[in-house]
Amino acid sequence: MQRGVATFTLDWGKCPPWLFRRMVSLGREMTETLIAEYGPDEFVKRLADPVWFQSLGTVLAFDWNASGLTTILTAALKESIRGQERDLGVFICGGKGKTSRKTPDEIMNWGQKLSLSDGKAENLVYNSKMSAKVDSSLIQDGYQIYHHSFIFSKNGAWAVVQQGMNTEEQTARRYHWFSDDIKDLVVEPHKGIASQRINKLNSTLNMSSKKSDKNRQISTELVNSNYKTIMKDIEILRRHSSDLSQMISYRENNGDKTTLASLARKEFKTHPVMVEDFGKSKYLERILGKLTDEKPDNYESLLATKGVGPKTIRALSLVSEIIYGADASYEDPARYSFAHGGKDATPYPVDKETYDKTINTMREVVKKTRINPLEKDKIYKRLSPL
């Protein structure tokens, strides 16, 4: 899908009770029809698709350009299947704010009810936690995660729909995951990332990019060395993080000229190391000490370590890049902009083929629901292409 321009504003309001009740009622019909037509695994897969997810929100009559579509749609779907989860074969956990933190407990509760083995339930919890860690720590794009929903089927297919906010810019960004598309939890695992805007050069640290492979490797090697070695490197950054010429001098004196050209480029002045605060941090030092003690086997295990967050990942990344020449990616990974209209009947098509296919499928599903003809006509109007 090509990028387009579509407003995705941060919505601070609440969904009116009458609208939420309507979304739950219609969502129940849509969910039952979709699962009957395509099966529970395919339903989970479709929710993991940014375009499909947005289209479903359109059908349920929520504003197409508001961040609330994500939070309200997942809440409405969760409520719409309440009590029918086993029959439908689909389970929705988590949600917005405090509810998101209940996701592991909700998954484990379903694991007990469904008599899942401890291993299967724990693996679902692990995938849920790792997806949140990747989008908050590996992709440092300025959006703070505040909504996390984990959807899985009775057959084991799972999806994540989570959203972050940038309060300064009053915008939101949505991250989609689907189990069958993931080969590696930490390397480009997303089904799609939907955002209004793409960040400027060097403003996003993307440690999930394939371009960051060498940086991840060096980061892992660093924590498998010893505490004194890694702290010696940290001290170098602390001394020189505000002075580009000193960093270049250090690299030259150590015979490493592999990335001096990139260091000297004008745009490098916006590089995170130039604005990073490497002052004394007992917490960072404690986490690095823990990592060097535990010596994680790989980068995924490094990230999964309790206490490892954005600052730890950033510190290791910058040491790997500035001192050892292992470049990281600073390209914004967002690949999708919102492409569908809402209750105001103003769709904004970006990829016409994908758009038309999605809308036509939605129209067919609506046709098979058990809602009255007047309601169907209203939905058809919202789904009418330009």
Image (spheres, grey):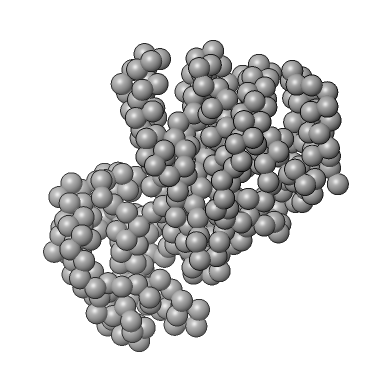
In the picture as drawn, the residue positioned furthest to the right comes out as: 386
What residue do we see at 31% from left, 85% from top? 246
Identify which residue, 252 or 320, lies in the foreground. 320
Question: Eyeballing the image, is 296 above or below 197?
Answer: above
**Residue 252 in the image, given as x and y percentages of width and height:** 32, 82
**Residue 159 in the image, given as x and y percentages of width and height:** 51, 34
Instruction: Specify whether 44 is left or right of 296.
Output: right
**Residue 51 in the image, given as x and y percentages of width and height:** 67, 42
How many tags in the picture? 0
What residue do we see at 33% from left, 84% from top? 243
Asked where in the image residue 315 lies, by quadrant, the reply is bottom left
Say if residue 258 shows up in the picture. no
What residue do we see at 59% from left, 62% from top? 198
Question: Eyeballing the image, is 85 above or below 332?
Answer: above
Asked where in the image residue 309 lies, by quadrant, the reply is bottom left
**Residue 88 in the image, given as x and y percentages of width and height:** 56, 16
Question: Eyeballing the image, is 156 above or below 148?
Answer: above
What residue do we see at 35% from left, 86% from top? 245
Instruction: Specify whether 199 is left or right of 287.
Output: right
Question: Eyeballing the image, is 272 above or below 165?
Answer: below
Say if residue 154 shows up in the picture. yes
